[in-house]
Image (cartoon, grey):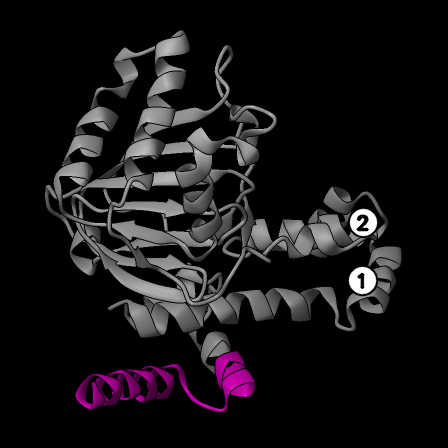
Amino acid sequence: MLYETIIPASGCSFTKKNFVFKHFPPDWHYHPEYELVAITEGFGKRFVGNGVSEFFPGDIALIGSNVPHFHLSDQVFYEDNDLYCSSEVIQFNLNVFPAEFRTMPEFAGVVRLLNESVRGLLFRHGADVDWILGRLSNFERLDGLTRYVELFRILGRLSRGTEFTYLSTSVGGGYGRVKELHNLPVSRAYQYLANNFRETVTLEKVAEYAGQNPTALCRNFKQSTGRSIFSCLLEIRIDFAYKLLVNSDFSIIQVAYESGFRNISHFNHKFKEMSGLSPLEYRRMHRAKGRDSEEDA
């Protein structure tokens, strides 16, 4: 899982970005900042915490601090065509608010909104959503105090009775696993694995990033986590493959590649070793469970 570092532009206390991609990068990531994201083009699956939902143009989501998330564009966006995906995103820390904002009555609604965002919030349809989409599209024209106040206006509008649905059943981020490790070399090694699991990983590269020689790092990592560096890397890759198998239409070869495997036979072997099923069996079983749940509902 990728820990994303977000640095506002000079003279700004928060970030506002407009993203345009052929397909959204399927990078499972988290960051301390709260994130307000509006989908302007594209559709697919949205992953927030332990929840999976569909995303469409016009959706607005508020994702809490350190809550993991990513957008997986539909398979059609990976094909040779003119389709694309885009979004408007604001990312902010609590330091954008007055020091005592949690006790100020004017911010009561916003405080409730931020507290609820630990489960991810989806806003869809209605006059408030349409108004916010319009404000986001014009955000780049603002600067200075006007830009700062506009963030408060948007959050205030969302907090005044706009209906939402939760995107995750888990409460809180809790995905700062890298930061929870008090052993700095091990923490940095884990961060390197989480950030680079889709690439070719060598012990030398991990050790260099961690600031410890390879032999010492291997011993240190095993003592701190109870498993080897490459066992941890395998768990990260297989965990990502689970998500893609159940919630995408990627072929097994595509799933293997997106999860960091370059050899399909090795992927199939390790996947079955860890799950007891082949990737295809795992996909069929979990999709059958999904259909059964829909019929029961």
Tell me whether circle 2 and circle 1 mark residues in contact (CB < 8 Å).
Answer: yes
Q: Residue at x 77, y 46 (%)?
A: 210
Looking at the image, which residue sits at the far left?
82
* Magenta stretch: includes residue 277: yes
Q: Where is residue 103 in the image (x, y as percent from the top left)?
A: 56, 34
Q: Position of residue 2 (x, y in %)?
A: 54, 49
Q: Name the residue under label 1.
A: 221
Query: Gap between marks 2 and 1, in whole Å?
Result: 8 Å
Q: Give the range drawn in magenta.
A: 269-297
Q: Where is residue 183 in the image (x, y as percent from the top left)?
A: 83, 53
**Which amino acid, by three-letter code, is at mark 2?**
Pro
Does the rendering let one see residue 252? Answer: no
Quarter containing the N terminus: bottom right
Q: Name the residue under label 2.
A: 185
Camera-side residue of 74 and 268: 74
Q: Which residue is drawn at 51% across and 48% down?
A: 30
Q: What element carries label 2?
A: helix
**Which amino acid, by three-letter code, is at mark 1?**
Phe
Hey, which quadrant is residue 228 in on the image?
Answer: bottom right
Residue 93 vertical position relative to residue 44 in the rendered view, above or below: above
* Magenta stretch: includes residue 156: no
Q: Residue at x 44, y 66 (%)?
A: 50
Quarter containing the C terminus: bottom left
Q: Main secondary structure of the magenta part?
A: helix
Q: Residue at x 55, y 56 (%)?
A: 197
